[in-house]
Amino acid sequence: MPWGRSGSVARQLLAGRTNVRVKARDLSPTEMNVEPWASPQDQAAAEHTYPTHTPSLLSAQDQEQHPDKLCLDSFWSEVETIQQGSGYTDLDSTRRDSKQSEEGDQEEQWLADAGLSTLISEDSEDVNNAVLLSTLTRTQAEAVQRRLESYTLSLRKRNKPPPRDVRDIFDSPITQTLLTNSQHSEDLAPNSMASVAKTPLSDLQQQHHGAPKEEIFFTDVAYCEQAVIFLKQAKLPQNNGHRRKEDGTLPRVICPRCRLGVTRVQDLSHADMKKVRQLALIDMTALSDLLELEVKRHKTCKRKIPESALFGVPLATLLENDQKVKPNTSTPLFLQALLSFLEKKGLDSEGILRVPGSQSRIKLLQQSLETTFYSGAMSWDDISPNDAAALLKKFIREMPSPLLTAEHLNTFSAVRDITELKQKLHMLNLLILLLPEPNRNTLKALLEFLSKVISREKRNRMNLWAVATIMAPNLFLHKAVPSRLTEGAEKEKGQVEKAADIMRLLIRYQDLLWTIPNFLMSQVRKLNENSNRRYQFYDRRIKNLLRKIHTDSRDKPEKNTSEPRRTVKIQVGDLVSSTMEVQVNINSRASDLLAQFHRQFLCSPDNGKGKLRRNGSVTYPDCAIYEVGGNIGEHCVDLETHLLDLYNSNPGGEWFIKLKPNASRGL
C-alpha cells in the first residue's frame, strides 16, 4: 500500500507513541540553581557567563532604539555597492546561479541531513528507524511525518512508486515495541515544563507597557515544544492584548544555571556535533512549521572559482590551505590578520565600517594581498583603516557561497518575521548549530570584532544599530541566492529595520547562540545509548529484550546521592601521564577537580612542569576535564559542572584531564 493510504496510521504512531521528553539516565539538567547566571556586574568574574561584552552595549541601545536616517542611508548605500561590485543587479542571473530543489528533492535532502534517510531506504533495518525515532519529542516527530508525507506525495505526482510502505517503517515489531515503551520517558523536566508554561506571557502581562528588562531563556525543553505551550497560552482570553510591543530595546537574557554546566559548540567531538546538527534541523523545522515560516532551501550551482589565493575562494578550501601553514587553525589566516589590524588601528576610527575607502586603493591592495600575503612580504603599516574595513566586507560578500550558507540563508532572513524575541533567539540558536564548522567559526570571529567596534562607540560613533545596518546587506545579500530585499516594494524603513534586527541579535546575543541547549544534549545522549544497544535488538527474543530494557529504565533506583570515588586519567602531553583518585559529593565541581590536579601535579615547587616567563612567573599548560565514552563521544566539561550530576548522567563514561586542543605542547 502506498504511504499516503496509511498516513493516519503513521501520524498516530509518531504523534502518540513518540511523545518522548528525552531522558538519558535521568540527566538532571532541570535541577537548576535558583540564582540566574551572573548579572552584568558579575559577568567579568565568571567564565561561564555570556555575553561578557554585552554590558557595554546597553547604553548604545538605550540611546538608539531604532536606526536613524544616516543608518538607513548607509544600508542602501551598502546595497548599491554590493550590486555594482558583485554583478548582483540582474536578479535573473542570480536565479540561474541558484535553483530551488525540485518538488520532493527538498524532502529527500532534508531527511538525509536529519540523519533519517533510512526511513525511505528499501534495505534499511527497522532497528535503525527505532533508534532514531525514539529520541524525538511529539512535535519533532510530527515534523518528520509531514516531510515523509510530502515526499510520498511528490513521488506520486511524478508517477514514481515510494520505496517503502509507511507501515513497514512504523508497524514493525521492533519499532512498535520501542516507541510504545518510549512513552515512559515523557516525564522529563516536569518542573521545567511548568516554568516554561508560566513565564512567557506572565512577564508580558506585568510589563506590557514596555519591553521587559530581563528575559528568562530555558533550554531544557525542546524549542518547538516551548512554542506549542506559548501558542496555547496566546489563545487564552486573559492573554489577549498583553503582547509586548517592539520598541527596539533588547533585554538582558538570563539562562538559569544547569548543574551539568554549559556546553559550547567547541566542547563536543565531531561525531556528537553531527548528531547535534541532525537533531537541531528537526527541531528547527518543527518550530518553523508552528510559526508558519515559509522556508525554502536553495542549492548553489557549481561556479567557476577564480584563480585567487584569498578572495572568492571557498571557505573550506581556504581553511584547508591555511591548515598546511598553521595546523588546527579554525578561521582563515587572512581574516585573522585583517581583524587583528582593524582591532589595533581601526576601532577608534570615526565611522569605521560606514565610511567607504578609496576604490582605487582597495583594488590595488587586494591585488597586492593576493600575491604577497602568504610570503609575509605584505606590510600593513600604510593601510588606511577604512580601506581595510572595506576589504573585510568585500572578502565576506565575494565568497562563492554565503557565509550563512545557501541552504539556510533564507531561513536566517525569515527570522525577522517572528514576533517574539525568545522565539527569534530559539531559531537563531538552532541555525548557528546547523552551519558547517568553518562558516560557524568565521561568523563568530566576525561578530566578536563587531562587538569590539560597538564597545568604542563614544570614539568611533558606531552604535549597535549603525553596525547592524551596515553589515546586514553583506551577510544577507548574495548573488548565489535570490533575495526580496533589493526589490522596490521592500525598500521601506520597516524592512531595513527587520533585516538589521537579525544582525543586531547575532551581535548582541552571540555567546548564548553559540551554546548547545540542554535538550539537544539530552537527545544526543539518548541517541548514543540507543545506538549502543542496537545489536541487542537482533536477538530472537527481541520483544523480551526490549521490554527488559525499558523496564530497567523505568524501575531503576533514584540517582546516586552517595559519594562515589572516580579514577581520573591524566594525559597532559609529555608532562604528565598518570591517574588520580577523587571522591565526588553533591557540592563537587569540575573547577575543584582541576584545582586539585594543579596542586598535586603541577604546582609543586620542584616538579619542573611549568614554563618560566621573562618576568619570573610560571605558566602551566591549559588543561580541561573531558568526559569520554558511555553515552557521549567526547565532551569538554564546563568548570561549573557538578561532578555528581555528571557521574549520574553518564556512569559508563571515563574522565580525563587533557590539554585543550589549541594549548601549547612545548612546555
Image: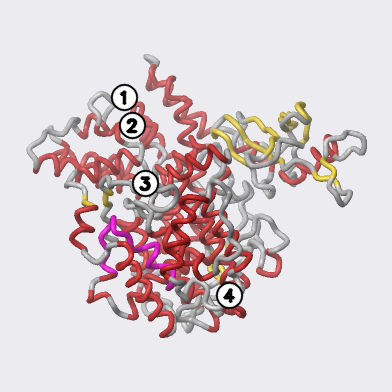
Q: Earlier in the sequence, mark 4 or mark 1?
A: 1
Which image quadrant for residue 366?
Answer: bottom left
Label 4 Cα crowd, 10 Å radius (few <14 / some 14-19 / many 20+):
many
- Cα–Cα gap, marks 4 and 1: 62 Å
- Measured as percent of width and height from the top left, residue 95 is found at 20, 57
Q: Residue at x 38, y 35 (%)?
A: 132
Residue identifier under label 3: 307
Toward the right, the furthest residue is: 606
Task: Classify mark 1: helix, strand or loop.
Answer: loop
Q: Earlier in the sequence, mark 2 or mark 4?
A: 2
212 to 376, vertically: above or below: below
Task: Classify mark 2: helix, strand or loop.
Answer: helix
Residue identifier under label 2: 129
Task: In the rendered structure, find residue 265 and report the number of the disc placed on it.
Answer: none
In contact (CB < 8 Å): disc 4 and disc 1: no
- Cα–Cα gap, marks 2 and 3: 45 Å
Number of numbered tags placed on the structure image: 4
Task: Give the left or right position of residue 603, taking residue 18 as reference.
Answer: right
Task: Give the left or right position of residue 542, taking residue 479 as reference.
Answer: right
